[in-house]
């Protein structure tokens, strides 16, 4: 045992897993459960840091990006969402193309690399609205990468347009789409989805959209929304289903564990994920997803200080500047809605890591 010694390991049940990881072997569902059942967080974190260092060295990546949520009108009623509105409800909005350009102009800088676009499943507008959103942005900001529409949104577009998911993707690519974000995955088990998001894409539908996107040559993202009703086993099943698809396509760039936010900012700490669970889930994600290049710490959900910890618990990415994040902040997120490049660099350096500004596809823009 080269890296770890039994003397420093609190939980001896981790020894077989340590041997597997040091040998570069894949972990099983049972291994994942052993990790979740262990309270030896420092050993789990060290293992994840070992795996991440093998893949990414001391580098931690970030991007200068901008969130755009063109509409919050949504036909779905997901149990965890505070962002959605019904048509005509107070606070409901749908941006026109002029509204869109006005909104972007307020936050855009010459170094903005990416527009990250997600919104409600708005059934009051046609599929052309979603195409026009991309066309308008691509026409006015041709050098900015467009990361738009979750796998669940693609399934919704196919339904309203009478097209297949593959046809929808091809139309979006023709309009200027570059990559899919990872949202809409939540937890990829039908037991969970039946309770939490019954009106959205099924597990198989979400996975199939990303398979189709990968087959079209697109690189995409994947998330996991944890901390509500799911069991630890379901989190692991979620990771393993993504891992299986990645074995087939190698189309995922990054995995993003998202801590669920309570419905109100004033919610007690008992309604939030614990720092212990956040760090353990980050580390286990890195250990289970051996074929993913990156695991991202989403500072919007876990906060800036835990994000600094996360880059020593398996994360190689801390997301981006955002400018204005709305979805998590429509519920109980306590974090800032945006950070500057200098603040992101400071966070990464403060954790003893090398800050790397990247584009959407992890090409290096600048080392700090």
Image (tube, rainbow, N blue to C red):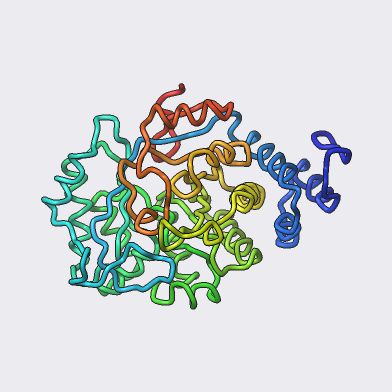
Depth check, front residue: 70 or 92: 92
Q: Is residue 46 left or right of residue 64?
A: right
Locate residue 347 relative to residue 84 in the image: left or right: right
Q: Is residue 202 above or below residue 33?
A: below
Q: Name which quarter of the figure residue 63 lies in.
A: top left
Query: Which residue is at 43% across, 47% downward?
Result: 300
Residue most extreme to the right = 7
The residue at 65%/35% (across/down) is 54
Report x, y in % for residue 285.
61, 51
- Front residue (pair 119, 262): 262
Q: Where does the N terminus fall, quadrant-wise?
A: top right
Residue 318 screen position, x and y as percent: 48, 39
Above or below: residue 356 compared with residue 293: above
In the displayed structure, would residue 103 be above or below residue 108?
below
Q: How far from the left and from the top, in percent, is residue 41?
A: 71, 46
Q: Position of residue 216 (x, y in %)?
A: 39, 54
Q: Quadrant of residue 5?
A: top right
């Amino acid at each position: 045992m080269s890296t770890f010694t039994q003397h420093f390991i609190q939980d001896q049940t981790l020894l077989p897993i340590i041997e597997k990881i040091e040998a570069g072997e894949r972990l099983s569902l049972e291994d994942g459960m052993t990790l979740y059942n262990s309270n030896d967080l420092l050993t789990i974190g060290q293992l994840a840091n070992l795996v991440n260092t093998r893949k990414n060295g001391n580098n931690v990546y970030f991007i200068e990006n901008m969130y755009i949520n063109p509409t919050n009108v949504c036909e779905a009623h997901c149990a965890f969402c505070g962002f959605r509105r019904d048509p005509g409800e107070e606070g409901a909005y749908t941006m026109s193309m002029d509204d869109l350009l006005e909104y972007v102009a307020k936050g855009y800088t010459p170094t903005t690399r990416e527009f990250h676009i997600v919104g409600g499943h708005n059934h009051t507008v046609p599929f052309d609205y979603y195409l026009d959103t991309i066309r308008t942005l691509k026409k006015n900001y041709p050098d900015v990468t467009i990361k738009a529409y979750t796998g669940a949104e693609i399934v919704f577009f196919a339904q309203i347009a009478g097209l297949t998911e593959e046809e929808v993707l091809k139309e979006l690519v023709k309009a200027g789409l570059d990559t899919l974000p990872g949202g809409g995955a939540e937890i990829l088990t039908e037991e969970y989805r039946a309770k939490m998001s019954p009106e959205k894409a099924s597990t198989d539908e979400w996975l199939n959209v990303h398979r189709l996107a990968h087959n079209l040559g697109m690189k995409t993202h994947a998330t996991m929304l944890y901390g509500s009703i799911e069991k630890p086993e379901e989190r692991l099943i979620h990771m393993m289903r993504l891992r299986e698809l990645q074995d087939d396509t190698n189309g995922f760039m990054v995995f993003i564990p998202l801590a669920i936010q309570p419905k109100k900012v004033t919610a007690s700490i008992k309604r939030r994920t614990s720092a212990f669970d956040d760090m353990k889930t980050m580390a286990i994600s890195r250990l289970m997803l051996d074929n993913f290049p990156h695991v991202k710490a989403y500072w919007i959900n876990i906060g800036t200080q835990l994000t600094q910890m996360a880059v020593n618990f398996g994360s190689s990415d801390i997301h981006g500047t955002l400018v204005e994040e709305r979805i998590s902040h429509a519920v109980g997120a306590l974090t800032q809605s945006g950070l500057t490049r200098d603040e992101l660099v400071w966070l990464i350096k403060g954790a003893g890591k090398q800050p790397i500004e990247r584009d959407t596809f992890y090409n290096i823009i600048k080392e700090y």
